[in-house]
Structures are given as C-alpha cells and as structure tokens.
Image (cartoon, grey):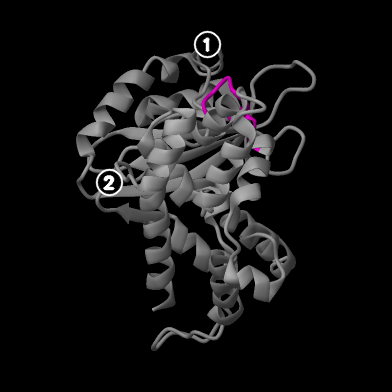
Amino acid sequence: MKKLQLQQIIKEEVKAVMSEGRSSEDGYSIHAMVGGGQDRAQDFIDDNNIDAQKLIDYIKQNIRTNPAIKYDVRDYISGASGTVGAEKNLRDKFIKQFQKASPMKEVSGFSSGKQFIDIKLQKYPKAIAKVDELIAMIGESKFTVEMAEWVDDFFNNAHYERPIAERVRRISVEEEIKKILKEYTSNPFKAIVPGSGRPAIDPAFFAKLMPKSARTSKEAYARIQQWNGKSMSVYSQYFEVTPNGNMPNRPIYQLHQQQYGGGSNVTFLTILDVTDGGRGKDVGVCYVDTKVFLQEYKVVFQLIKQVS
C-alpha cells in the first residue's frame, strides 16, 4: 500500500508541474500589473504555494517608487532564460518571500523537505541520492515537508515487510526506492514547455556539447506534443559524465532523463553542472531523440556513474 501511495504522490506532483490553463482572479491581477500572462502567473502561485495577496500587495507598494520592479517580478514568475528569473538562487529567494507557511513545517521545525531528508536520512547516502532524483524531477519547492516525512516513515519501516513464502531478509532501503522511482505513469500527460520551469538550454552550447542530439531537439518537442492528454509511461534515470579528452579541469555534468514510452522515442533532458559539487547549477533543459541521445553520450562523454 505504501508503494502505491508514494507512486500516487509522484504522479500528482508531476501532473501539477505539467498542468496548464488554470486561471483565477489572483493570476489576472498579477498579470495586469506586471504582464507575462494570466495562466503563467496562476501556475507560479499554485506550483510554489504562493500567498497571492502578499505578492499583489508587494507589487502595489513598490511599483510606484520603482516602476522597473514589474519586470523583475515578471521574470521571476516566468524563470525565462537570460533574465533574473533564470538565476536559481535569486528566484528561490524571491519565492520564499511569498510562500504560505506549511503547517507541518511549523510542527517539525524544518524549513524544507530537502533539509528534512538530508538530516533524517544522513546515514543512508544512497537513499538520499534517490530522493534527490525525485526532487530534481518535480522541483525542490514542490517537495514539501509533508512528503519528506512520509518518505522518511517509509524508509524506517520498509525493512519490517516480508514477502509471503520468501526467505526472511533485510530489505535494502535503496533497493525499495529504486523500484518505486524507476518508472511511473502520467495520465493525462502534458508535455513540459522548456523554459517554463528550469531554463531552456542554450542551443549553441548544446550543439557543441552534443551536436547529433541537438539537431533532434525541435523535432522531438513537436513529436512529444502528440501525446498530450493521453496516458504516458515515464522512465527516469541520470548519468554523471565528463567530456572526453585530456584537457585539465574538465566539467562534470549530470544528464537527468525522463524517457517517454508509447513509441514516442523522446527524452526530456535536464543538464546540471556539478563540477563544484552540491546540487549543481542549471545548464538547461530540452527534448531529444532518445535513441540518438543514448548512442551519442557514449561517444562524447566518459561515464562516471549511472543511476536508474
């Protein structure tokens, strides 16, 4: 039952990230003041648990003395590449100013779901790595303290479960979460718009990094939109790689993939630069042809590790 519950959480959170077309009076009010689109403003409110009235009051109070602030707010909402909204640290700081308090946060004392997991599961580094995959997939702001507490409870109790008529053994926490996160179904499916969350990758940079895959990007995006509104199986994994060659100080990238089924042969690719460690820096997102990508990465990169 717990596995099904966690799968349902993942499905609901991914669906929320992908959803479009919502509108409300709050979204309209913000759009009227700063531009950028009513639906996009409402998505920003819903996806980040924003106190809309607090944000509206902030705009009203500051726009008279600093008219240019509307452009910053618009860009923080969109997260568009080449704007202040593409700077993850600045955007996260802006979002935190207006987020509603989480009831569970007040009880637990943790400021985020990520902080909760890092502390509670510090003895399970591989398990933390798997949860980080989930966070990368749905967005850190969507991974709430409530979700983190449920995952922690699952980890702490999973090893008590025993399959019927099977030899008693201690179940690996990492093994259990790997089974759960490896594949899920999005229904109804909605193709992510590159740049609507994480910044879209710079085409010129991607063409140098993976030229063959870069040439498939536009066609892959057009192809995946044919599955909008249908049921879609999604397989997730990531590769940690470094470019081939003998140059010193080669960068290290993580290539996070959401590989779509249904014969689509499309992958939504998220590239992070993890050269300096930590959660990494956004390089960008795009769609690619799955077969071309899986062939090319072996040629242009040296594989450090694969997590699936």
Q: Name the residue rendered at 79%, 19% in the picture.
A: 248
User: In this image, 275 relative to 29: left or right?
Assistant: right
Q: Name the residue rendered at 68%, 17% in the picture.
A: 245
User: In this image, 26 relative to 188: left or right?
Assistant: right
Magenta residue check for 86: yes
Which quadrant holds the N terminus? Answer: bottom left
**Residue type pointed to by label 2:** Phe
Residue at the extreme front of the image, as rendered: 64
Q: Which of marks 1 and 2 is nearer the N terminus?
A: 2
Does 308 appear above or below 123? above
Q: Name the residue nearer the viewer: 121 or 68.
A: 68
Q: Do the residues labelled 1 and 2 touch (CB within 8 Å)?
A: no
Q: Residue 113, how many percent across, how many down? A: 62, 61
Which residues, given as a range, are shown in magenta? 80-88
Provide the secondary structure element on which disc 1 rests: helix
Provide the secondary structure element on which disc 2 rests: loop
Q: Name the residue nearer the viewer: 270 or 264.
A: 270
Picture quadrant where residue 75 is located:
top right
**Residue type pointed to by label 1:** Ala
Q: Name the residue rendered at 70%, 60% in the picture.
A: 115
Q: Dot 1, how many residues are within 10 Å of its Cα: few (below 14), some (14-19), or many (20+)?
A: few
Q: Residue 140, how many percent across, how many down? A: 58, 50
Return the residue at label 2: 189
Specify the label residue 204 is tagged with: 1
